[in-house]
Image: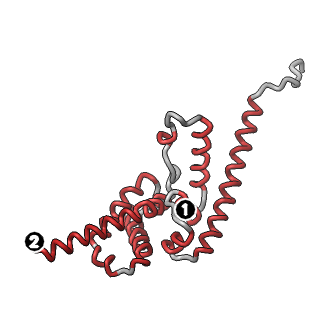
Amino acid sequence: MNQSSQGERDDDVSLFNRTYEQYHRPLYAYLLARAGEATAADLLQDTFLHVWRHINSLRQVPDDRHRFWLFSLAGNVLTDHYRRNAVRQRHEPSPMASDEEYRGPGATAAETDSRLDMDAAIARLPEGLRVIVVMRYLGEMNSDEIGDALGMPAGTVRYRLAQARKQLSTYLAEVKQATTGVAKAARPNSTARTDV
């Protein structure tokens, strides 16, 4: 291998590594929200395999458009995945961590239940809202970054995030009310008559 091609290869590896470090987390969050936990890691791997195969194309994209290019590519990988499987499924279980990940040595039963309730609430959101929530909180992206990745104005992202928070709040209040009602029903009532 001559020095020129070795230098180009080193540049390719460097660009790929920088791209991966900067974008793997938000891309994973996007794929997780769209495809579920069982498939997201594989789709992320496929996405970065495409990045490597098209590294020269990425090199031609202006730096400020890398995010858009990568999310477009991830969307295409996701579409290909659905086509291959010929079935569009909403994912279950939730887009967040599994039960086993919640049961650490310091986790109380209440904390575990709270996390599971939040996961169930997120899973109930319509896909468009769920994607934004997961990209925001798991992907740690701001509204400008999410808007750029999804091709929508940042104001629309903020509005949808507010809608999602409202729906999550409503659902979690319902869960709390249901569990409080169950707890009250389970307590013996000292004023109840037993001679009837």
For the residue pair 107 and 93, the one nearer the viewer reads as: 107
Asked whether disc 1 touches disc 2, contact meaning CB atoms under 8 Å apart, the reply is: no
Question: In x, y percent, where is residue 73?
Answer: 39, 71
The residue pinned by badge 1 equals 136
Report helix, strand or loop for mark 1: helix
* Quadrant of the image containing the C terminus: top right
The answer to whether 133 appears left or right of 77 in the picture is right
Q: Residues within 10 Å of mark 1 (few under 14, many from 20)?
A: many
Q: Position of residue 48 (x, y in %)?
A: 33, 65
When asked about the image quadrant of residue 163, the answer is: bottom right
Could you say which is closer to the camera, residue 97 or residue 59?
59
Residue 87: x and y in percent read 44, 61
- Image coordinates for residue 83, horizontal then vertical, percent: 39, 66
Residue at the top extreme? 195
Please give the name of the residue rendered at 47% of the width and 55% of the height, measured from the top-left corner: 36
108 vs 66, left or right, is right
Q: Earlier in the sequence, mark 1 or mark 2?
A: 2
Residue on which disc 2 sits? 1
**Amino acid of disc 1:** Arg
Callout 2: SS: loop
Residue at point 46%, 58% (across, down): 32
User: In the image, what residue occupies the spot 74% across and 44% down?
Assistant: 177
User: Depth check: 3 or 187 in front?
Assistant: 3
Instruction: Locate the N terminus by quadrant.
Output: bottom left
Kind of residue at badge 2: Met
What mark, if any, has residue 112 been given in the picture?
none
Q: Nearer the viewer, mark 1 or mark 2?
A: 2
User: Relative to 178, does residue 195 appear above or below in the rendering?
Assistant: above
